[in-house]
């Protein structure tokens, strides 16, 4: 069996997805996904949120971005490859960055968290033809004849 390097995350977007392009025209989609864990402490439950920066490339990135559903608060599922990259921060401390790339993105709902609080959009009025009374039929035999 081959080794696998896969991570699966469900959470909400912390900001709208960002689509940008490299100088050679390749699309890069960036997402920031927050995943909350509840911890009990001092008689209360506290949410401890971990943030993941996820990236998708190419035509898949453009396709999912063009759906228009990757907005702040949207619930998503992410399955992707990850890697650890060391770096030195501005204070000279050695740090590790977890890079999450080549994501498979699944929309778990098609509305943002704020959408449930928005009033419903007004519906368009019915067409005039649908509002007219039915036309009386002529020369229709009666049951009593």
Image (cartoon, rainbow, N blue to C red):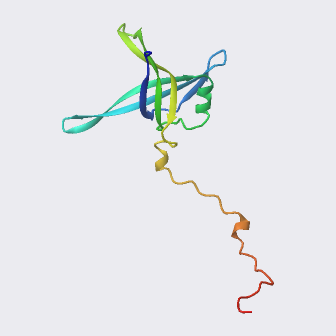
The residue lying toward the viewer, choosing from 83 and 131, is 83
Asked where in the image residue 86 lies, by quadrant, the reply is top left
Decide if residue 104 is on the left or right side of residue 52.
right
Check the image and report above or below for 132 versus 69.
below
Between residues 44 and 63, which one lies in front from this camera angle? 63
Q: Residue at x 47, y 29 (%)?
A: 78
Q: Position of residue 80 (x, y in %)?
A: 47, 23
Q: Is residue 103 above or below residue 132?
A: above
Up-down relation of residue 34 to residue 119 (above or below): above
Does residue 6 lie above or below 118 as drawn?
A: above
- Residue at the farthest bottom position: 145
**In the image, residue 79 lies at what x, y percent?**
47, 27
Of residues 17 and 58, the one nearer the viewer is 58
x, y percent for residue 6: 44, 22
Q: Quadrant of the N terminus?
A: top left
Most distant residue in the left direction = 42
Which residue is at 51% across, 31% downward? 105
Total number of numbered discs in the rendering? 0
Horizontal side, residue 141 vs residue 83: left or right? right
Q: Hey, which residue is sitting farthest right in the picture? A: 139
Which residue is pictured at 60% across the width and 27% down the height? Answer: 60
The quadrant in which the C terminus is found is bottom right
Report the side of 120 relative to 6 (left or right): right
């Amino acid at each position: 069996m081959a080794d696998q390097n896969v991570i699966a995350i469900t959470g909400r977007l912390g900001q709208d997805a960002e689509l940008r392009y490299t100088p050679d025209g390749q699309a890069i989609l960036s997402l920031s996904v927050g995943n909350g864990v509840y911890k009990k402490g001092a008689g209360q439950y506290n949410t401890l949120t971990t943030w993941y920066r996820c990236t998708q490339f190419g035509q898949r990135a453009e396709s999912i971005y063009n759906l228009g559903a990757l907005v702040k608060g949207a619930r998503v599922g992410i399955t992707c490859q990850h890697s650890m990259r060391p770096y030195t921060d501005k204070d000279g401390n050695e740090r590790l960055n977890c890079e999450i790339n080549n994501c498979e993105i699944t929309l778990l709902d098609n509305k943002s968290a704020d959408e449930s609080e928005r009033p419903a959009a007004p519906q368009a009025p019915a067409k005039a033809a649908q509002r007219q009374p039915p036309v009386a039929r002529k020369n229709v035999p009666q049951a009593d004849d």
